[in-house]
Image: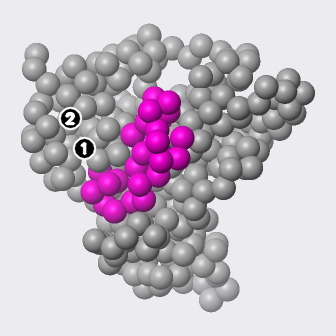
């Protein structure tokens, strides 16, 4: 089997429709927008629960700045919401198919894929990426940490929508590890889900550091723009899976007892002091305990 050419891949990714939002999130948003007592910050928090709505809001606001410098791009959901206004956000909600678009993917991909697990894993990585960088006292522009964690597996959704046959071949089978899954994607499709998601986000004017983090969330050592962000997304992905929230992939989860042995750990926490590492792991344990409870009730 020959993988698809870059030309065909790019053409099909460009044809990917605007991504749908979860019905419950849309309902909550509409109620907030209609309420006279709502604040933009509340609306922004609900938008951040949905990877596809986050993408569309940032895409819309940054399309106005297309061709401008990186410094002018908007990465924060609250800032974007203020800029767009409530009417435009309402238009985004009403113009986009909701949960039916997601559930219809089962028919297109000839299998029963757990899309709620996909969203839950994405949200968990968004929350934990922010927690990790906060513990590391590493600041990023606006909400690049949350957005990068939320969208790291966006390429999987794009594969399901635009590469249905190839998607079923890859995600319908079990894999020994994420690395095996990625290699299968490259063999059958030509690009893996990380590169596909990164290209989609780049093409929709999302910031370079977010695009890089999505592109290298499985290989953070290759990141150059913001290695700590890419490493935080990689580590979050591993630790959220360690909580049993594995997303869509049918790959074995090997329980992680020592977080410091994960390769991306040293990029975020380059400490030689053992006491400092112990302090960090204690904070992280507390974060993971809270996150586990949040993810049980997030959808």
Question: Which element carries disc 2, helix, strand or loop?
Answer: helix
Residue at the disc numbered 1: 161
Q: Nearer the viewer, residue 295 or 15?
A: 15
Residue 177 seen anywhere in this rendered image of the structure: yes
Provide residue 157's location: percent of width, then percent of height.
Answer: 34, 42
Q: Is residue 103 left or right of residue 254?
A: left
Mark 1, Cα crowd under 10 Å, few <14 / some 14-19 / many 20+, is many
Mark 2, Cα crowd under 10 Å, few <14 / some 14-19 / many 20+, is some
Provide residue 222's location: percent of width, then percent of height.
Answer: 44, 33
Quick check: 155 above or below 256? below
Image: magenta residue range: 200-227
The answer to whether the residue labelled 1 contacts the one labelled 2, judged by CB atoms less than 8 Å apart, is yes
Most extreme residue toward the right, as rendered?
Answer: 275
Q: Residue at 77%, 40% (x, y): give it.
A: 287
For residue 232, which quarter of the picture?
A: top right
Residue at the disc numbered 2: 164
Provide residue 280's location: percent of width, then percent of height.
Answer: 81, 35
The stretch drawn in magenta includes residue 293:
no
Provide residue 96's location: percent of width, then percent of height.
Answer: 32, 65
Q: Is residue 254 left or right of residue 9?
A: right
**Disc number placed over residue 217 in the picture, else none:** none
**How many numbered discs sit on the rendered protein?**
2
Q: Is residue 119 left or right of residue 280?
A: left
For residue 63, which quarter of the picture?
A: bottom left
Residue 244 seen anywhere in this rendered image of the structure: no
Q: Residue at 43%, 85% (x, y): give it.
A: 87
Quarter containing the N terminus: top left
Question: Which element carries disc 1, helix, strand or loop?
Answer: helix
């Amino acid at each position: 089997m020959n993988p698809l050419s870059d030309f065909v891949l790019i053409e099909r990714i460009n044809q990917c429709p605007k991504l749908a939002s979860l019905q419950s999130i849309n309902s909550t948003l509409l109620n907030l927008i209609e309420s006279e007592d709502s604040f933009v910050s509340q609306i922004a928090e609900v938008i951040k629960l949905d990877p596809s709505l986050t993408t569309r809001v940032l895409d819309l606001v940054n399309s106005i700045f297309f061709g401008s410098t990186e410094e002018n791009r908007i990465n924060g959901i609250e800032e974007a919401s203020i800029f767009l206004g409530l009417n435009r956000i309402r238009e985004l909600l009403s113009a986009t198919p909701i949960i039916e678009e997601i559930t219809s993917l089962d028919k297109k991909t000839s299998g029963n894929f757990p899309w709620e697990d996909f969203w839950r894993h994405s949200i968990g990585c968004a929350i934990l990426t922010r927690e990790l960088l906060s513990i590391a006292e590493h600041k990023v522009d606006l909400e690049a940490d949350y957005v990068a964690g939320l969208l790291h597996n966006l390429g999987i959704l794009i594969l399901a929508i635009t590469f249905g046959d190839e998607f079923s071949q890859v995600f319908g089978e079990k894999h020994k590890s994420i690395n095996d899954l990625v290699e299968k994607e490259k063999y059958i499709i030509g690009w893996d889900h990380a590169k596909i998601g990164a290209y989609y986000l780049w093409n929709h004017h999302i910031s370079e550091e977010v695009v890089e983090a999505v592109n290298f969330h499985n290989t953070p050592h290759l990141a150059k723009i913001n290695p700590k962000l890419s490493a935080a997304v990689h580590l979050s992905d591993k630790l959220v899976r360690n909580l049993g929230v594995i997303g869509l992939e049918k790959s074995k989860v090997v329980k992680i007892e020592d977080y410091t042995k994960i390769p991306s750990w040293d990029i975020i926490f380059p400490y030689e002091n053992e006491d400092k590492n112990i302090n960090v792991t204690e904070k992280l344990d507390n974060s993971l305990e809270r996150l586990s409870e949040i993810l049980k009730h997030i959808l």
